[in-house]
Image: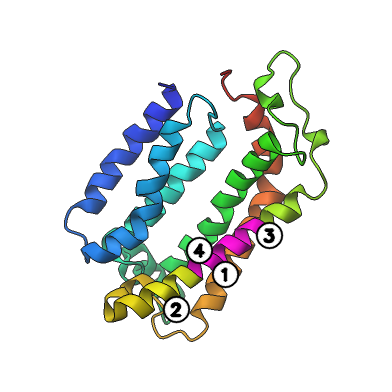
Amino acid sequence: MDRRLIWFLGLLIPVMAWSWIDPHDRFTWWLESVPVVAGVPLILVFQKKFPLSTLLLVLLWLHCVILVTGGHYTYARVPLGEWARGWFGWTRNNYDKLGHFAQGFVPAILTRELLVRTSPLGSGNRPFDLAQGWSAKRTSRWLGFLVVCVCLAFSALYELIEWFTAVTSGAAADDFLGTQGDPWDTQTDMLMALIGAVVAVVAMSRWHDRSLQRIPDK
């Protein structure tokens, strides 16, 4: 197994174990953590055919930690959000906004990596061609725009899933929604995801390009 994945799993499994033990609500834990439970096995299954860049693995690990922490406490009760609430005088626990910022930021790099390596927007599998190298100049001008569009669409889909869960589960989904009485929670969640995606594309693209060049050969 790729050493990077060994580190990824070695640092994630203890956090997952902590999150699983005595969460605030087991149903909410599953709702918040299902992207991790489903996503990590996919990374392992495709590691040989499609190894991810180191930058993306680090960001995915951070996103997993954010998700399972929210699953353990529920987003409205995460201590970090409560501390920030006291420091900044906020009227609510805004840890969920961090989660939605990450929901735009991390999937932006994931989407960018998939498009760069598998579509005409990038340069195909050239990152694996270590002898010839890979040039970020070959990426399309539309790449960043489409990455942001995909992330915003995903955020909207997630809000629809939250709505459907609330309708079908009733009060049991209150902790999953985490609106905390904010009538604009859905809109601000999508705004945070949009901001996260834009920041990722603007601030991380060059770093991501360098990380793509260092992907281990298949």
Assess disc 3: are there few (<14), some (14-19) or many (≥20) residues with their C-alpha within 10 Å of its C-alpha: some
Picture disc at residue 90: 2
| Label 4, label 2: how far apart the Cα atoms are | 18 Å
Residue 24 falls left or right of residue 84? left
Q: Closer to the camera, 116 or 164?
A: 164
Picture disc at residue 127: none
Q: Closer to the camera, 83 or 160?
A: 160
| Labels 4, 2: front one | 4
Relative to 151, say whether 178 is above or below: below
Number of marks:
4
Confirm or deny contact between disc 4 and disc 2 (CB under 8 A).
no
Picture disc at residue 100: 4
Residue 107 falls left or right of residue 26? right
| Labels 1, 2: front one | 1
Q: Identify the residue position indicated by label 3 in the image.
A: 149
Determine the secondary structure under disc 3: helix
Q: Identify the residue position indicated by label 1 in the image.
A: 190
Residue 76 % position (x, y): 35, 72
Q: Amino acid at mark 1?
A: Met
| Label 3, label 1: how far apart the Cα atoms are | 12 Å
| Label 4, label 3: how far apart the Cα atoms are | 15 Å
